[in-house]
Amino acid sequence: MNAESCCIGHPSVPAAHRVGRRRFVQLAGLGAGLSLLVGLAPRPAGAGTAEVLLLSCMDYRLVDDVGAFMAELGLTEDYDHVILAGASAGAVHPAFADWHATFWEHLQAAIDLHQVQRVMVIDHRDCGAYKIALGSDHLATPDRERDAHSELLGQLAAQIAERQPALAVETYLMALDGSVERIG
């Protein structure tokens, strides 16, 4: 065995698989470094559980803002996320009746699988699904828009309270700048 070889350079190891001592040490160091990084990866606080089921809209303009809001609340990796166009409208408005069962099935799965304790619903301003369901009249003023969201958020909160009385419900309205107002 010469100075550049080690057991990995042993003649019984095929030549194509042999590495010198320096290369072996480099590769071993990379592997050790990788194992350290993997050990630093964040883990969910309560493996197998989630505090919240979050219902939000599919609008691409607010995906990052919704995630940032949940992080501000300390809920990163502690929520299940259901996305329906219109959020509350998708769950309760007759224009989206085919989706209602989907929301309830997701909620039950979140309870059964992750023992969620509360539901958070985040609607947002200038929502296309609300325009489909309600037309554009609800956008006449910011107050009318807020009232329209408050109505459907309230309907959904009441239905959740009736079907799942042990769950807390929180409802919010997000502006396009990412700011959030609690409703109800």
Image: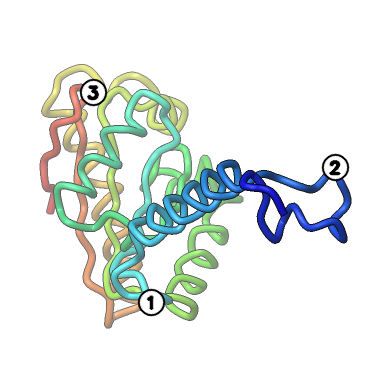
Which image quarter: residue 43? bottom left
Q: Are marks 2 and 1 in contact (CB under 8 Å)?
A: no
Q: Position of residue 100 (x, y in %)?
A: 52, 56
Tell me the amino acid under the disc marked 2: Ala
Q: Amino acid at mark 1?
A: Arg
Residue at disc 1, secondary structure: helix
Closer to us: mark 2 or mark 1? 2
Q: Position of residue 23 (x, y in %)?
A: 59, 42
The chosen color scheme is rainbow
Residue 53: give x, y in percent of width and height: 36, 62
Q: Between tags 2 and 3, which lies in front?
A: 2
Q: CA distance from mark 2 to mark 3?
A: 58 Å
Q: Tell me: residue 6, above or below residue 150.
A: below
Q: Which residue is mark 2?
A: 16
Mark 1 residue crowding within 10 angstroms, few (<14) / some (14–19) / many (20+):
few
The answer for how far apart the CA atoms under marks 2 and 1 are is 65 Å
Q: Residue at x 72, y 54 (%)?
A: 1
Task: Tell me which numbered mark, 2 or 3, is placed earlier along the sequence.
Answer: 2
Reading the image, the residue beneath label 3 is 176
Label annotation for residue 63: none
Q: Residue 163 — which label?
A: 1
Q: Is residue 166 left or right of residue 88?
A: left
Q: Position of residue 103 (x, y in %)?
A: 49, 59
Name the mark nearer the viewer: 3 or 1: 3
State which tag comes first along the sequence, 2 or 1: 2
Type of amino acid at the residue the image marks with label 3 = Leu
